[in-house]
Image: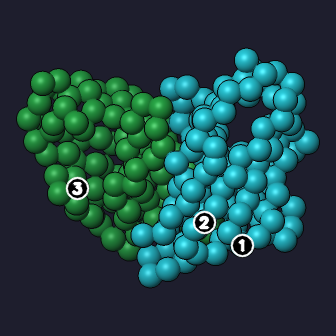
Amino acid sequence: GAVVSQHPSWVICKSGTSVKIECRSLDFQATTMFWYRQFPKQSLMLMATSNEGSKATYEQGVEKDKFLINHASLTLSTLTVTSAHPEDSSFYICSAPHHGGEETQYFGPGTRLLVL
Amino acid sequence: KQEVTQIPAALSVPEGENLVLNCSFTDSAIYNLQWFRQDPGKGLTSLLLIQSSQREQTSGRLNASLDKSSGRSTLYIAASQPGDSATYLCAVTNSGNTPLVFGKGTRLSVIA
């Protein structure tokens, strides 16, 4: 099946620093990718939709200036958490729709962010 | 706005029991429904995908059913094993190119 990778898988950083997370579709092109966030013992919540060649669309309550999204190519989307604070500590996971024989979405393995 | 509810929130069963996890969604105009497994601190593992035109899907000891008109799906696990212990998430999408809406999950513990 199709594969989506994320890098890094783990990040520990100091408060105030910026963290970049990459999401790549390895064997298919994705004009759209989705970014989700999961706080401990909560479900996945959509943060934003990343669109290749245009601006991302953000869900209500998600600060676009804090969570910068760049969909640089048909296989890469990046999420940058700017000036991270402890409350940004979470599990960030991306997905990409795959329009093959069975249209479905493939998820990356996730990135766990801990801000000290 | 689509909302997904999973019942129960947590479930503990002895090894060998058959069990059913429930998922309901408010907007029946779905494109497909997926069941995922998530182990603690890990990502998602897709278990079963049911297209809106399908009634059920089976994989090994897992069987998922879909009643689109009533907005319900069940995940049946036969002969449960301790290795089945995980959180099971149900998610729906309205098209092949829209994000998934997840339920809060059912945390399953299978006791040896």
Q: Which residue is at the front of the view, B39 or B34?
A: B39
- Circle 2 chain: A
Q: Which chain is green?
A: B
Residue A3, relative to residue A10: is it above or below? Answer: below
| Residue type at tag 1 | Leu
Q: Which quadrant would the N terminus of chain A be assigned to in this image?
A: bottom left
* Residue A79 seen in this snapshot: yes
**How many callouts does the rendering have?**
3
State the separation of the CA atoms marked 1 and 3: 35 Å
State the residue lying farthest toward the right: A65
For image coordinates 64% across by 75% down, the residue present is A29
Q: Earlier in the sequence, mark 1 or mark 2?
A: 2
| Residue type at tag 2 | Ser
For image coordinates 38% across by 74% down, the residue present is B53
Label 1 residue SS = loop
Residue A16, relative to residue B103: is it above or below? Answer: above
Report whether B112 appears left or right of B52: left
Asked if the residue at tag 2 contacts the one at tag 1, i.e. Cβ–Cβ closer than 8 Å, the answer is: yes
Chain A is shown in which shade? Answer: cyan
* Residue at numbered disc 1: A74
* Residue at numbered disc 3: B63
* Residue at numbered disc 2: A25
Label 3 residue SS = strand
Q: Position of residue A105 (x, y in %)?
A: 53, 63
* Residue B25 seen in this snapshot: no
| Residue type at tag 3 | Asn
